[in-house]
Amino acid sequence: MRKLKKLTIDITDNHVKKDTLVIIGNGFDRWQGLDTSYSAFRKHYLQHRDEIMKKLRIKKRKVIYSTDHIEEFSDVELVYGDPFQPNELDEIFWGDFESSLNKIDDQKLNLFFGKEQSELKEMSRSIRNAKKILTTAFCDWIASLEINRQNQEYKFGDNCVFINFNYTDTLVKHFGIKPCMIHHIHGESSDKSSIVFGHSSHPQYPLPQLYDFGGRFRGAFFVDSLLYETDKHVQDNIQELIMFLTLQAVIPDNIKHIYVLGHSMNPVDIEYFQFLIDMTSVKSNVEKDAPTQDNFDPMEDFKSQIDYIVSHRNRTFYGETPSEQQINAIRKRFLTEQEERDKFMEKLFFKKIGIKAENSKSQSPNAYINNRLEDAKWHISCYSNKDKQWVEIVMKELGCKNYVTYKTIDECIEHFRIV
C-alpha cells in the first residue's frame, strides 16, 4: 500500500470561496523558459547513464560483434528495446517517454533469457536494473532543474486552487502562489520519493500464480511486475486529489472556471480530466465503478486474466485486440483491488485530520454530491492548431461542451494580468 503524499492546509484561506481550478502542465514550465521536454531528459540520460550505473553498482552489458567491434549498453536498452539487437532507444521511445514504458515485448525477453531458473533469475535482475536506472536518471534530471525567483505580470487570487502536473516550484517562485494551494499530483522535485511518472495502462497487481507456474509464466510475471511499478496509478492519485480539495474546502458545485495551462491532455492523463469534467458538470452524482458479481465464475475469470496477461504485450506491437471477456476480467480484478486501496487511503486520511473511522462515513472525501445548475467553463491554452484539434477531440469524447481554446497561455490567462 502506498503512503499519502504531503497534504497541508492553510485555514486562513478557507473563508475564501474557491471557484477556480488551474491545471498546470509541462508547457507551462516551458513557457517560463525551462527546458522540461522529453528530449532534454534523453540528453540528460545519455550524458549521465555511466555515472548512474556506477553509483547503482550495475555493470554494463557487452555485445561482441567482432574482435574490433564491441558495443556496451545498459539494461534499459535491453528491456525497452530489442534484446537480440540492443542499440540506443529511438526517437519514438523518447518522444512519448511515459507511454513508451508500457511497450515491452515480453515474448522476445522470454526467448532472450530462457526459462531455466538461473536464466529467469537473470531476467528478473535485468528488469529491476532497468527500472532503477531510469528512475534514478529521471529523478536526478528533475532535481537538476534550477528555477530562479522572479515576479511575473500575473496575479492569481485566493479563489484559485492549483493542480500541478509538473514537479517544479515555478508557481511559487514566479507567481507567488502559496505552496498549500498547490497539489503536485505526481510529486515534487524537492522530494524524490514522491515523484510519479509512467504510463496508465497496467494498474492491477501482477498475478502471483504466474510466478508459481514457473518457466515462461514466471518471465511474464516479472514483466507484469515492472508494468505495475511503472504505472502512474491514476485512481490512487485522484483519491489524493480529492483529499487535497477536501482540505482546501473546495466544493465542486462552487467551481465556475477551470484553466488548463500547457497541458497536452495526453491519453496517459485522460482519466484525471474525465474525473474533473464529471465533478464540475451538470450530471448525476459522481460515482466510482464498482466490481460486479453478476454471473461470476472465478475459474473462468482467472483463465481470462491469464490469457490477457500472457498475450497482451504482443498485442501492443502487433495490433491484436483482446476479447471483451478478457478485458472485463482484468477490469473486475482492478476494481476490487482499487476499492481496497481506497478504503486504506481513506483511513490514513481520517487519521491525519483526527476523525475516528466510525465517524468518517458521512464525511468521506469521496462523497461528492453533484447539485450543479450549470457546467463549469474550461479555458484551455493550445500550442498549435494540431493541439487545438486534439483538445476538441478529447473534450467531445469526455462529454464537455463548455470550453474555449486560446492560442497561447498569455491569452488564456489575460484575465489575471496585473494592470
Image: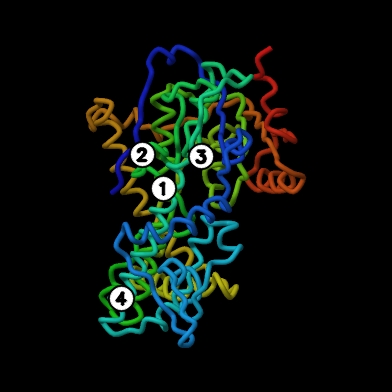
Say which label, 2 or 3, has the lower sequence index. 3
The residue to which callout 3 is attached is 165
Say which label, 1 or 4, has the lower sequence index. 4
Say which label, 3 or 4, has the lower sequence index. 4
Residue most extreme to the bottom: 66
Left or right of 297? Residue 394 is: right
267 is higher (above) or lower (below) than 211: above
The residue to which callout 4 is attached is 122
- Residue 84 or residue 201, whichever sits in front: 84
Task: Give the amino acid at mark 2.
Answer: Asp
Determine which of the numbered discs, if any, sits on residue 191 in the image: 2
Rendering coords of residue 105 (x, y %): 48, 73
Left or right of 388? Residue 326 is: left
Q: Residue at left 40%, top 12%?
A: 12
Task: Give the amino acid at mark 3.
Answer: Phe
Determine which of the numbered discs, if any, sits on residue 139 in the image: 1
The crowd level at tag 4 (other Cα within 10 Å; few <14, some 14-19, many 20+) is some
Say which label, 1 or 3, has the lower sequence index. 1
Rendering coords of residue 54 (x, y %): 33, 61
Label 1, secondary structure: give it: helix
Asked whether the residues under the numbered discs 1 and 3 touch, taking CB atoms below 8 Å apart as contact, a structural biologist would say no
